Image (tube, helix red, strand yellow):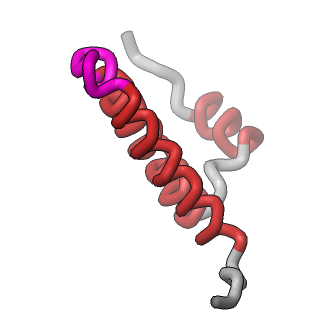
């Protein structure tokens, strides 16, 4: 058996096994396991969102945003 060439695959496998061990250890307290799984899901969704936003390109230049804000003032 050869070791995985990609370090990310190894890290993901270790995280998966650690999660399985955590679920197995907490099987007598399902409320706690559910809370941890929901928090893990929220974290995963946030990380996915950050990854998608980083692929879309940089945000607007702050100087350009200030220029637009000074030319088009808000009307209250």
| Number of numbered labels in the structure image | 0
Q: Is residue 42 visible?
A: no
* Left or right: 73 in relation to 5: left
Rendering quarter of residue 26: top left
Q: Is residue 55 visible?
A: yes
Identify which residue, 56 or 22, lies in the foreground.
22
Rendering quarter of residue 14: bottom right
* Left or right: 34 in relation to 10: left
Whether residue 31 is in magenta: the answer is yes
Q: Quadrant of the N terminus?
A: bottom right
Residue drawn at 37 percent across, 10 percent down? 76
From this viewpoint, which residue is outermost toward the right?
Answer: 63
Residue drawn at 69 percent across, 78 percent down? 6
Which x, y percent locates residue 12? 55, 60
Region in magenta: 26-34
Identify which residue, 26 or 73, lies in the foreground.
26
Rendering quarter of residue 29: top left
Which x, y percent locates residue 44? 44, 45
14 is higher (above) or lower (below) than 56: above
44 is higher (above) or lower (below) than 37: below
Residue drawn at 68 percent across, 89 percent down? 2
Whether residue 75 is in magenta: the answer is no
Which x, y percent locates residue 38? 31, 30
Which x, y percent locates residue 39? 39, 28
């Amino acid at each position: 058996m050869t070791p995985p060439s990609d370090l990310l695959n190894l890290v993901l496998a270790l995280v998966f096994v650690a999660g399985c061990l955590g679920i197995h250890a907490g099987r007598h307290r399902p409320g706690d396991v559910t809370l941890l799984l929901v928090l893990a899901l929220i974290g995963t969704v946030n990380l996915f969102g950050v990854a998608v936003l980083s692929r879309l390109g940089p945000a607007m230049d702050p100087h350009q945003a200030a220029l637009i804000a000074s030319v088009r003032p808000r009307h209250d």
